Image: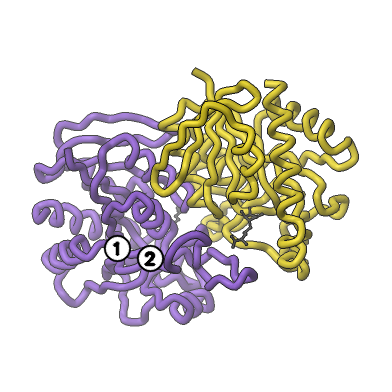
Chain colours: A purple, B yellow
Amino acid sequence: AERIAIIGAMDSEIKILLSQMKDVKKEEKASVTFYKGKLENKDVVVFKSGIGKVNAAMSTTIAMEEYDVNKIIFTGVAGAINNNLNITDVVISDYLVQHDYDTTVFGTKKGAVPGSVDTKFSADETLIKIAKNSAEKVLGKNKIYIGTIATGDQFIADKATVQSLETTFGAWAVEMEGASVAHVANLYKVPVVVIRSMSDKADGSAHMNYNDFVTIAADNSAKIVMTMLTQM
Amino acid sequence: AERIAIIGAMDSEIKILLSQMKDVKKEEKASVTFYKGKLENKDVVVFKSGIGKVNAAMSTTIAMEEYDVNKIIFTGVAGAINNNLNITDVVISDYLVQHDYDTTVFGTKKGAVPGSVDTKFSADETLIKIAKNSAEKVLGKNKIYIGTIATGDQFIADKATVQSLETTFGAWAVEMEGASVAHVANLYKVPVVVIRSMSDKADGSAHMNYNDFVTIAADNSAKIVMTMLTQM
Ligand SMILES: N[C@@H](CCSC[C@H]1O[C@H](O)[C@H](O)[C@@H]1O)C(=O)O
Ligand SMILES: N[C@@H](CCSC[C@H]1O[C@H](O)[C@H](O)[C@@H]1O)C(=O)O
């Protein structure tokens, strides 16, 4: 049985998906509610991971162990880093990096997880293509970008950090779960992609913009996932 | 069936334990090798999580889902923060905190994981007592302390960070996995304790001291776990 895991960190990020699901079986494990069922006629398990790297790693691992998952899509909002991006634009991950990882005193690169092959975790090429086509259908070509997504257990809200994330990692967007999900997916050798619509610019006004745009951005990303499912 | 999970981040931290195990069944999941068997006549699963919060969360979750674990002990080395501590002394966790967690722009406290009840995760009182008694037997009373352990995805090697970890969190020691394991254990409502022997002082000489003392410190902690098992 093939099953696609669809993950958001917050209720707003999975709201549309849950409202469209059929044949739902709801199960709770370790305080996470898993919704098993059909979306666009595909077998899926949809869940809210909670915020941050540990919540994301734990819930993704439960999905892998308990729901026969063979593809993972993360959907949600992020802070824009690249200057080309406007709020509500979408970044699809080609690579993901844990920007807050630092064992550089041992000679590793910033972001590198000891024991991992590369500094960045890779998203799946086929899923990236499907995400891009779907995103262009939903929002139009000029709002869609493919790039590195940086993840850390910090909500970034200052220009200096934004600039260093761009310089150090070539990051296009910053959020709090994507690279953790990709890290787990890579260890399980399961294809993964992260889709993020921009809620803010991760700068001094990030907190205000986030509150204003989180719903629109979360819905943008979820609609892209719905369209992806029709193409899988 | 009751089974105790015993976790180290690195080979050196579980070496003594593996050498003493009986009836070992070895299984690999998501690149982690799980050793199921007996230690001091208790049912255990011993594994190397790998370094950092995501590796720790993933492997602990696999143990919870696949091995009927009802108690978790983490064993390893850490950087000393409190001035009372000498290298090779032991800190047993009463609380654990992810010091690199920061969503303070939303009004949360530094270290607080959104959605969690408290900023710190609690260790289990019974396991703390057994760990303390065992540690005193192995190393003598004057080398054993109970306190907050701070966890982050950074190897800390500067005095200023050490001081801020003490001021902000009242931390006694700093490492890279404990609070992630405790976070997962708390969500599963399974008792947990973290035992750490000091390999360094997390300051400018941390890297050199770490390399000199990691083996002695790792063995100290593993020997305490062996003694704990005789009392459980
Ligand atoms: N006001 C929220 C905190 C949002 S953290 C930011 C989230 O969106 C981000 O882009 C991250 O990926 C997080 O999941 C709360 O307190 O629940
Ligand atoms: N030289 C090592 C890096 C150690 S990171 C430090 C570890 O010990 C620490 O106290 C943490 O908890 C980590 O597990 C390596 O490159 O494998």
Q: Report the label total.
A: 2
Label 2 with label 1: CB-CB less than 8 Å: yes
Q: Quadrant of the C terminus of chain B?
A: top right
- The residue lying at 46 percent from left, 25 percent from top is B68
- Disc 1 is placed on an element classified as loop
Chain to which mark 1 belongs: A
Q: Residues within 10 Å of mark 2 (few under 14, many from 20)?
A: many
**Depth check, front residue: B125 or A187:** A187
Label disc, if present, on residue A41 of the rendered structure? none
| Amino acid type, label 2 | Leu
Give how far apart the Cα atoms at labels 2 and 1 are.
7 Å
- The residue lying at 31 percent from left, 76 percent from top is A85
Q: Is residue A8 above or below residue A103?
A: above
Left or right, A32 with reference to A197: right
Residue A127 image position (x, y, % from top left)? 20, 60
Residue B93 in view: no
Label disc, if present, on residue A123 of the rendered structure? 1
Residue A13 in view: yes
- The residue lying at 15 percent from left, 56 percent from top is A228
| Amino acid type, label 1 | Ala
Left or right, B137 with reference to A7: right
Chain to which mark 2 belongs: A
- The residue lying at 41 percent from left, 42 percent from top is B28
**Depth check, front residue: B24 or B197:** B24
- Decide which of tag 2 and tag 1 comes sooner along the chain: 2
Q: Is residue B11 above or below residue B61?
A: below
Give the quadrant of residue B182.
Answer: top right
Q: Residues within 10 Å of mark 1 (few under 14, many from 20)?
A: many
- Disc 2 is placed on an element classified as strand
The residue that disc 2 covers is A96
